[in-house]
Image: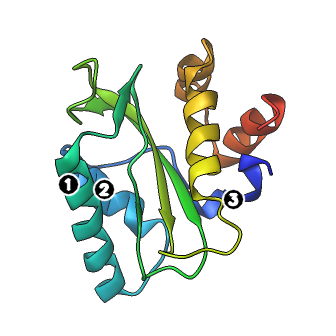
């Protein structure tokens, strides 16, 4: 299983407009192109997850994630906010890179945790934040995943 199998260029936004955690979550959800009612449900689920503890893991990276009935298969999106947003990250620094993961409550392929793990592992590589900051289009994001073998 490789991460790039789950991403598509239309679910990658390199210029997020939001200035708050809620704005960013809504923008990321929008990248999945779900019906409006499902977007609202997903937002509530992600907010509930964030209230348990921030998914901001430090180094400018957050991985908001949850399971929800609004999707029938694992869905992912990536967003970047160059200026950074207070996401209550573990290191108390602004977050610039957001990997959204949404999976159905029951998934036969059981890819939710492996995908979460792979994104976390990818994010810990020393040069990844710098490379993510320098991307100029979604295609380069896909190429970065390929170059890193994820």
Residue 12 x, y percent position in the rendering: 56, 53
Residue furthest toward the top? 126
Q: Quadrant of residue 60?
A: top left
Q: Secondary structure at mark 3?
A: loop
Give the residue number, with chain letter if any, for mark 3. Answer: 6
User: Which dot, 3 or 1, sits closer to the camera?
Assistant: 3
For label 2, the SS is helix
Q: Position of residue 101 (x, y in %)?
A: 49, 57
Alpha carbons under labels 2 and 3: distance apart = 19 Å
Report if the CB atoms under discs 2 and 1 are less than 8 Å apart.
Answer: yes
**3 or 1: tag closer to the N-terminus:** 3
In the picture of the structure, the residue carrying the numbered disc 1 is 22
Q: Position of residue 121 (x, y in %)?
A: 61, 29
Label 1 environment density (alpha carbons within 10 Å; few <14, some 14–19, many ≥20)? some
Q: Reading the chain from its start, which is encountered first: label 2 or label 3?
A: 3
Q: Are marks 2 and 3 in contact (CB under 8 Å)?
A: no
Q: Quadrant of residue 74?
A: bottom right
Residue found 26% across the figure and 39% down from its top: 54
Q: Residue at x 50, y 44 (%)?
A: 14
Nearest the eye: 142 or 121:
121
Q: Residues within 10 Å of mark 2 (few under 14, many from 20)?
A: some
In percent of width and height, residue 57 lies at 38, 29
For this rendering, which residue is in front, 12 or 38? Answer: 38
Image coloring type: rainbow
Please tell me how crowded label 3 is: few (under 14), some (14-19), or many (20+) other residues with Cα within 10 Å: some
Residue ID for mark 2: 25
Q: CA distance from mark 3 to mark 1?
A: 24 Å
Q: Are marks 3 and 1 in contact (CB under 8 Å)?
A: no
């Amino acid at each position: 299983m490789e991460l790039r199998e789950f991403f598509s260029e239309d679910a990658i936004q390199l210029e997020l407009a939001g200035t708050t955690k809620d704005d960013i979550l809504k923008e990321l959800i929008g990248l999945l192109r779900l019906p409006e009612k499902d977007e609202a449900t997903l937002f509530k689920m992600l907010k509930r997850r964030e209230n348990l503890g921030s998914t901001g893991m430090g180094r400018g990276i957050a991985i908001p994630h949850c399971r929800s009935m609004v999707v029938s298969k694992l869905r992912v999106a990536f967003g970047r906010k160059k200026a950074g947003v207070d996401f209550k990250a573990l290191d108390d620094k602004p977050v610039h890179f957001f990997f959204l993961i949404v999976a159905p409550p029951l998934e036969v392929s059981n890819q939710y945790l492996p995908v979460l793990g792979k994104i976390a592992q990818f994010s810990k590589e020393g040069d990844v934040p710098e490379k993510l900051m320098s991307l100029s289009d979604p295609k380069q994001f896909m190429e970065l995943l390929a170059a890193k073998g994820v």
